């Protein structure tokens, strides 16, 4: 079994993900090699909550320019985790 703290890298905090957190959906940046089962087991191990659904999204790199310099942002994998209805919300800032 993989270490759960190696699977979940960080929480993605934006306006959209903050609204999703109100309906028990939490967004995390996860390891590039992680699958849905790894993410489910990691969330259940870290926070002791039951997971209802996991959706995985591969976020591609984007071109960026800063003055005369050009480059790309890093590509990463994002997981949207839905908790069961009877579970209490995650306190993701305690991680």
Image: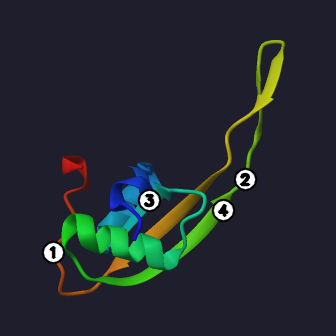
Neighbours of disc 4 within 10 Å: few (<14), some (14-19), many (20+): few
Residue under pointer 3: 7
Q: Secondary structure at mark 1?
A: loop
Horizontally, residue 24 falls left or right of residue 10, namely left
Q: CA distance from mark 4 to mark 1?
A: 28 Å
Q: Position of residue 60 (x, y in %)?
A: 73, 53
Q: Secondary structure at mark 2?
A: loop
Residue at (19%, 58%) from the top-left corner? 91
Q: Position of residue 20 (x, y in %)?
A: 39, 67
Give the mark nearer the N terminus: 1 vs 3: 3
Front of the two marks 1 and 3: 3
**Would you call the spot at circle 1 few (<14 residues within 10 Å), some (14-19), or many (20 or more)?**
few
User: Badge 2 is on which residue?
Assistant: 60
Residue at which label 4 appears? 58
User: Between tags 4 and 3, which lies in front?
Assistant: 3
Marks 2/4: CA–CA distance = 6 Å
Q: Are marks 1 and 2 in contact (CB under 8 Å)?
A: no
Q: Are marks 1 and 3 in contact (CB under 8 Å)?
A: no
Marks 4 and 3, how far apart at CA: 15 Å
In primary-sequence order, the first of circles 4 and 1 is 4
Quarter holding the N terminus is: bottom left
Crowding at mark 3 (Cα within 10 Å: few <14, some 14-19, many 20+): many
- Mark seen at residue 88: 1
Compute the Cα span from label 1 to label 2.
33 Å
Distance of label 3 from label 2 (alpha carbons):
19 Å
First in sequence: mark 3 vs mark 2: 3
Between circles 4 and 1, the one closer to the viewer is: 4
Which numbered disc, 4 or 3, marks the residue that appears first in the sequence?
A: 3
The answer to whether 64 is drawn above or below residue 29 in the figure is: above
């Amino acid at each position: 079994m993989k270490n759960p703290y190696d699977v979940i890298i960080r929480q993605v905090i934006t306006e959209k993900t903050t609204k999703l957190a109100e309906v028990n959906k939490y967004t995390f940046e996860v390891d590039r090699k992680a699958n849905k089962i790894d993410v489910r087991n990691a969330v259940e191990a870290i926070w002791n909550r039951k997971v209802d659904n996991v959706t995985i999204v591969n976020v591609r790199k984007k071109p960026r320019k800063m003055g005369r310099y050009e480059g790309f942002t890093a590509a990463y994998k994002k997981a949207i985790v839905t908790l069961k209805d009877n579970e209490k919300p995650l306190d993701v800032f305690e991680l």
